[in-house]
Image (cartoon, rainbow, N blue to C red):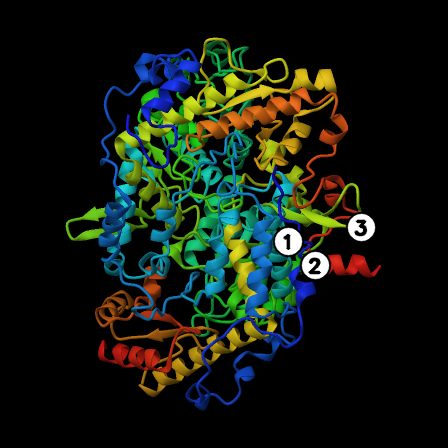
């Protein structure tokens, strides 16, 4: 046995003292009830312990093989974005009182996290113009999966229509979640020229077996669904729910989904103060209307205001409606989710507190202005851009003479990360990529991108 | 005596003042605007936001102070002992926190070209193999974001495997009555019928009970070892055999793996599918509720069913494969909670092969030591005489409640006043007035003794000072909350908008 700095009783003098008080000879006696044939008779094949110095060198040596922002500008979107994370977010997230806590099962001693979650829910409601938001899901993809299952439960129908212009990876996650519940996922083709949903086609696919229709704003091709309101109306006219997926960083300028009638809103809070982290952890947004049926069927943890028992004029916060959840309802729960992404709900809350309403508007303006500037520059250089002619926001589609995968490789050689080759997900779009723009990009970053794409022709 | 901060901190909305800002963005150069006539016109009218989101306006110092104050009204393992059973609240190493702030991980985008992410892929590939060795299985997927998601993945893989093997009829999942709620919930989500296994008098799953319940429809069994009572399932070999003989598969819920590192491997006990809660056993922070990570490992026959993408090692480096033919599909976007997994990697390397074994020994020692100090006439153990508990144990406060009227829930509230977190209460469901206690290996002998003293003193003072105990906690930011009305449809308040509407009326 070895003494270790994380293990305060690991020195043999202390261990022996504790064993003696238990009337035991050795630590082996603590496992006397374990059948001999399942005991491991050898050491684990793992490296020996590393000191902090060795560990930091070891990890750093590996990480040096990565290329990342801020050394390289990053132009990839598609569900995770490289945005600026304000310093105050880091500062708050490194408070051990927050990050080293468990789920707030004892509310009296956990008011800090509970109030933050209540504020997060409130901020998401303001941003999306929805009435109820839960305190987080794992990510956008699994939030969509849960939304699909919820729609099936609420409507007692089993068909879910999905615009094929939604993130293909999220559509796959939706299948993993919903097909075991007996749901059929049907994808709807987008208009090849504009990247937009075709309303008549969509209407023809809606029937009285349809539980929900899912679409994204902006969609995976970067296009704004101009007819969002019609999509929702068509869904409602057949008794189906409308699920909208949103990038919340655009909502300072883009119409909030609550205003075009969405029943369930999903998205990722990642662009609001969370590092991309190679795709995780990020944070799923889940919001709905204050309809008793929707609320009852909602997955995930909800924080509500709770009054003090002895002073009802004063209030605190507590987890509520827990009877929907697995620890109470077991196999009849609305979801199995337990651990969520609370710490990143806190990050989003701090971010939105800093940005306020003006900041979100300004952020939206940055994304809009820079993406449109870049598109104009591509056009000036003779590219067919945007490739999809529908109105776009943030992400610019571009057709090139070489395949998108090869283009991304060329760009990485000259110190640029991006774009996203759509051919990875759409076999028919091998020569189309999207490039994402936001507040982190300077004029010279964009000029470098345009000239590098041009010379990679 | 503990005194938690009491700030009466207003909600952000009530701190807002028109005109304040807490952000700074670079100016939008006139160059950008030179090619654009009017920004507003870039969004079609139908899709324009007509009114800015009604978010509060605060300056940076105010925002910082607000959250620092809130943090002071929150209790974490960095503040004090947190022996919440089944949650393995151990110390979170700070070196891992520092490493994860490195921009070469924090700013990586999941859709970057593989040539630009070789370092992180190498780390993840190594972690998959380290976890396979620790769990005694053939391969791991790091994708699931939490234990519950790992369970769902595991149940789906079992389902697909059985279907492909011509046993689509197998639709019953055996789950002990002492199991975590996520087990039955995950099995049901995957489309299984949940069959409850009653615990034996010893608190374990008996061979007899399993024999009675297995049949041709048995798809498998979900089990945590040691179980939620902190008892090692001593019949595990025979139980696994019964399930396997019936053509079923064994699922290991890794919530309690902190007892077994380097000593017992789930694969060697006959488990076919294993998930690991890295936010428990591998010391990654719980984040006030998340994020965690719930990697899933399998024996070789189930490996083709693992979620995609899979990390592949080639001669020229690592790549991500999305195309595995039999995969159950992805369970979330991208490849998992990478920054959490990197912390687990750092933890394993910090401890090394010997250190990990010591971790479990020390966890089990701490648990037995604490149990030995408790007053058994108030807190009745659920382990049998002569059988050591594992990393956690459960006592019933029924004797205390019968004698004084003070319940497990009251004890849990009274503990808070001492600057220590309560045990898990009323779980597992099969024990009345349950207190589930897991001190972990990172608490000192002195803290463990102090915790026992507190529990014993609550018990011994519960007659004379009953009123005081029933009204506790007194030293936390708030006293007891009316959780019933907080969840009542007539009085439920879910956002500040609803709060302001209520206050107006």
Quick check: A9 above or below A309?
A: above
Image location (x, y in percent) of residue A281? 43, 51
Label 2 crowd (10 A; few <14 / some 14-19 / many >=20): many
Q: Which residue is mark 1?
A: A118
Q: Which mark is residue B395?
A: none
Image location (x, y in percent) of residue A179? 49, 43
Q: Quadrant of residue B128?
A: top left
Q: Secondary structure at mark 2?
A: helix
- The answer to whether A412 appears left or right of B77 in the picture is left
Q: Are marks 2 and 1 in contact (CB under 8 Å)?
A: yes
Q: Are marks 2 and 1 on the same chain?
A: no
Residue drawn at x 74%, y 26% is B465
Q: Are marks 2 and 3 in contact (CB under 8 Å)?
A: no
Label 3 crowd (10 A; few <14 / some 14-19 / many >=20): few
Disc 2 chain ID = B
Q: Which mark is residue B496?
A: 2
Disc 3 chain ID = A
Quarter occupied by the N terminus of chain B = top right
**Callout in the foreground (3, 1):** 3
Quick check: A418 above or below A380?
A: above
Disc 1 chain ID = A
Spatial CA distance of label 3 from label 1 is 18 Å
Q: Which residue is mark 3?
A: A313
């Amino acid at each position: 046995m070895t003494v270790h700095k994380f293990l305060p009783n690991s020195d043999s003098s202390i261990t022996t003292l504790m064993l003696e008080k238990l009337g035991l000879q050795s630590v082996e006696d603590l496992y006397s009830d374990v059948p001999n044939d399942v005991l491991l008779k050898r050491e684990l094949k793992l490296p020996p312990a590393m000191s902090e110095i060795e560990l930091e060198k070891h990890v750093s040596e590996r990480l040096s093989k990565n290329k990342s922002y801020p050394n390289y500008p990053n132009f990839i979107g598609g569900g995770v974005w490289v945005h600026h994370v304000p310093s105050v977010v880091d500062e708050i997230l490194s408070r051990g009182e927050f990050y080293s806590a468990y789920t707030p099962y004892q509310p009296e001693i956990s008011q800090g996290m509970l109030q933050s979650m209540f504020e997060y829910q409130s901020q998401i409601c303001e941003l999306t113009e929805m009435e109820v938001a839960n305190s987080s899901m794992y990510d956008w993809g699994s939030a969509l999966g849960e939304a699909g299952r919820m729609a099936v439960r609420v409507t007692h129908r089993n068909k879910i229509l999905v615009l094929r212009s939604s993130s293909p990876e999220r559509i796959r996650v939706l299948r993993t979640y919903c097909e075991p519940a007996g749901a059929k996922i049907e994808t709807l083709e987008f208009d090849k020229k504009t990247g937009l949903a075709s309303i008549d086609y969509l209407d023809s696919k809606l029937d009285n077996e349809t539980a929900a229709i899912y679409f994204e704003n902006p969609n995976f091709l970067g296009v704004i669904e101009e007819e969002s309101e019609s999509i929702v109306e068509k869904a409602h006219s057949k008794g189906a729910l409308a699920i909208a997926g949103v990038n919340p960083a655009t909502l300072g300028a883009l119409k909030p989904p609550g205003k075009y009638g969405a029943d369930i809103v999903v998205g990722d809070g990642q662009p609001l103060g969370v590092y991309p982290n190679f795709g995780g952890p990020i944070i799923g947004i889940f919001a709905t209307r204050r309809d008793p049926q929707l609320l009852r069927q909602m997955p995930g943890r909800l924080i509500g205001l709770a009054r003090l028992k002895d002073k009802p004029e004063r209030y605190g916060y507590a987890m509520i409606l827990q009877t929907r959840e697995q620890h109470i309802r077991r196999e009849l729960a609305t979801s199995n989710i337990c651990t969520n992404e609370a710490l990143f709900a806190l990050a989003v809350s701090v971010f939105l507190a800093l940005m306020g309403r003006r900041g979100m508007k300004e952020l939206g303006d940055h994304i809009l202005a820079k993406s449109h500037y870049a598109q104009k520059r591509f056009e000036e250089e003779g590219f067919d851009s945007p490739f999809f002619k529908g109105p776009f926001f943030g992400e610019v589609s571009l057709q090139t003479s070489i395949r998108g995968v090869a283009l991304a490789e060329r760009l990485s050689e000259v110190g640029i990360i991006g774009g996203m080759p759509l051919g990875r997900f759409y076999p028919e779009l091998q020569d189309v990529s999207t490039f994402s723009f936001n507040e982190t990009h300077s004029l010279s970053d964009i000029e470098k991108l345009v000239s590098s794409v041009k010379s990679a022709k | 005596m503990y005194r938690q901060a009491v700030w009466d901190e207003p909600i952000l909305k009530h701190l807002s003042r028109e005109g304040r800002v807490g952000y700074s963005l670079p100016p939008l150069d006139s160059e950008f605007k030179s090619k654009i006539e009017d920004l507003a016109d870039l969004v079609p009218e139908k899709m324009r936001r007509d009114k800015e989101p009604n978010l509060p306006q605060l300056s940076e110092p105010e925002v910082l102070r607000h959250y620092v104050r809130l943090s002071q009204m929150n209790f974490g393992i960095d503040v004090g002992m947190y022996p919440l059973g089944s949650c393995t609240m151990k110390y979170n190493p700070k070196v891992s926190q520092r490493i994860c702030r490195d921009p070469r991980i924090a700013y990586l985008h999941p859709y970057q070209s593989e040539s630009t992410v070789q370092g992180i892929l190498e780390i993840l590939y190594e972690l998959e193999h380290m976890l396979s060795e620790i769990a005694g299985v053939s391969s791991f997927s790091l994708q699931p974001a939490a234990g519950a998601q790992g369970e769902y993945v595991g149940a789906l893989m079992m389902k697909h495997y059985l279907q492909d093997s011509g046993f689509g009829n197998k639709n019953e999942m055996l789950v002990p009555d002492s199991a975590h709620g996520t087990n039955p919930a995950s099995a049901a989500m995957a489309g299984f019928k949940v069959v409850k296994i009653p615990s034996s008098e010893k608190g374990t799953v008996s061979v007899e009970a399993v024999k009675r319940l297995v049949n041709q429809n048995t798809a498998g069994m979900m089990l945590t070892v040691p179980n939620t009572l902190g008892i090692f399932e001593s019949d595990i070999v025979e139980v696994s055999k019964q399930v396997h003989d019936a053509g079923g598969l064994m699922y290991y819920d890794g919530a309690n793996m902190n007892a077994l590192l380097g000593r017992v491997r789930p694969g060697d006990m006959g488990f076919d599918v294993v998930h690991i809660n890295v936010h428990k056993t591998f010391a990654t922070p719980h984040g006030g509720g998340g994020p965690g990570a719930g990697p899933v490992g399998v024996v070789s026959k189930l490996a083709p069913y693992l979620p995609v993408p899979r990390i592949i090692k080639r001669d020229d480096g690592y790549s991500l494969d999305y195309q595995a033919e039999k995969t159950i599909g992805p369970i979330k976007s991208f490849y998992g909670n990478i920054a959490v997994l990197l912390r687990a990697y750092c933890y394993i390397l910090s401890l090394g092969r010997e250190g990990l074994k010591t971790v479990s020994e020390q966890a089990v020692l701490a648990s037995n030591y604490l149990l030995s100090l408790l007053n058994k006439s108030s807190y009745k153990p659920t382990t049998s005489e002569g059988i050591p508990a594992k990393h956690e144990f459960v006592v019933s406060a029924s004797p205390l409640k019968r004698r004084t009227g003070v319940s497990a829930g009251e004890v849990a509230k009274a503990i808070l006043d001492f600057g220590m977190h309560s045990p898990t209460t009323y779980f597992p469901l099969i024990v009345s007035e349950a207190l589930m206690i897991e001190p972990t290996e990172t608490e000192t002998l002195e803290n463990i003794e102090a915790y026992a003293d507190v529990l014993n003193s609550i018990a011994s003072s519960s007659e004379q000072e009953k009123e005081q105990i029933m009204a506790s906690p007194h030293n936390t930011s708030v006293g007891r909350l009316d959780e019933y009305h907080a969840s009542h449809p007539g009085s439920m308040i879910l956002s500040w908008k609803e709060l302001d509407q209520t206050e107006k009326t």
